Image (cartoon, rainbow, N blue to C red):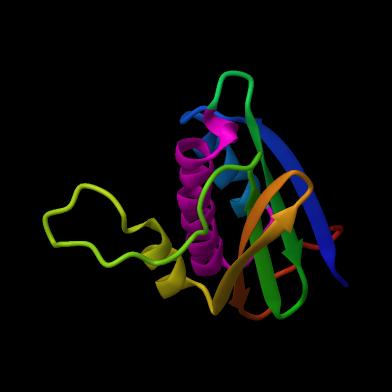
Amino acid sequence: MTTIAEQSFPGIPESAAAARRFVAARVTERALAHAAALVVDELACNAIRHSRSGLPGGTFTVCVEVAQTWLRVGVADQGGAGTPMVRQVSADADDGRGLSIVDALASEWGAGSYRRGLLVWARFEGTNLARSGD
């Protein structure tokens, strides 16, 4: 059984918390739910900060795909410049660690075109991930 859920959010910083809750509500394994929610928070913040999703009226979409032994989450933005990549930052830098966090927590991650923007996704491995009834 595979469950796919998708929800759009306004491209404002406050939406990151709603995106985290959206993901956490769909995963039964508590530690994995926390990791996936943190990854979505990072990806949502990147979408808001680095794409047209953060412009007035912009949105981003969170996608969740849950199977029995794996989970994939993604954030689709409305397009912007650049390709997501892990950056090397100094210890005293205030930002730039988001994709390093994603890379550390997820089994794998990547990015690709999605509608008129970019989808950045992360995959996690686990057991008994699907909620009953999903």
Instruction: Name which residue lies at 75% across and 63% down.
Output: 65
Could you tell me residue 55's position as x and y percent?
A: 55, 25
Instruction: Name which residue lies at 20% across and 47% down.
Output: 94
Instruction: Name which residue lies at 66% across and 80% down.
Output: 127
Along the horizontal axis of the image, is 34 left or right of 6? left
Q: Specify the farthest residue to the front.
A: 81
Quadrant for the C terminus in the image: bottom right
Could you tell me residue 131's position as x and y percent?
A: 76, 62
Along the horizontal axis of the image, is 6 left or right of 109? right
Residue 130 visible, this angle: yes
Q: Is residue 84 above or below residue 49?
A: below
Quarter-wise, where is residue 10 in the image?
Answer: top right
Could you tell me residue 133's position as x and y percent?
A: 86, 58
Instruction: Name which residue lies at 59% across and 69% down.
Output: 110
- Nearest the eye: 82 or 88: 82
Could you tell me residue 82's position as x and y percent?
A: 50, 53
Q: Is residue 108 above or below residue 97?
A: below
Asked if residue 100 is among those painted magenta in the image, a careful observer would answer no
Residue 27 visible, this angle: no
**Magenta portion: prevailing SS class:** helix
Along the horizontal axis of the image, is 17 left or right of 93? right
- Nearest the eye: 119 or 123: 119
Q: Is residue 88 above or below residue 49?
A: below
- Nearest the eye: 83 or 74: 83
Asked if residue 42 is among those painted magenta in the image, a careful observer would answer yes
Quarter-wise, where is residue 26 in the image?
Answer: bottom right
Q: Specify the farthest residue to the top.
A: 56
Give, as a single range, the part of the protein colored magenta.
26-54
Q: Specify the farthest residue to the left.
A: 92
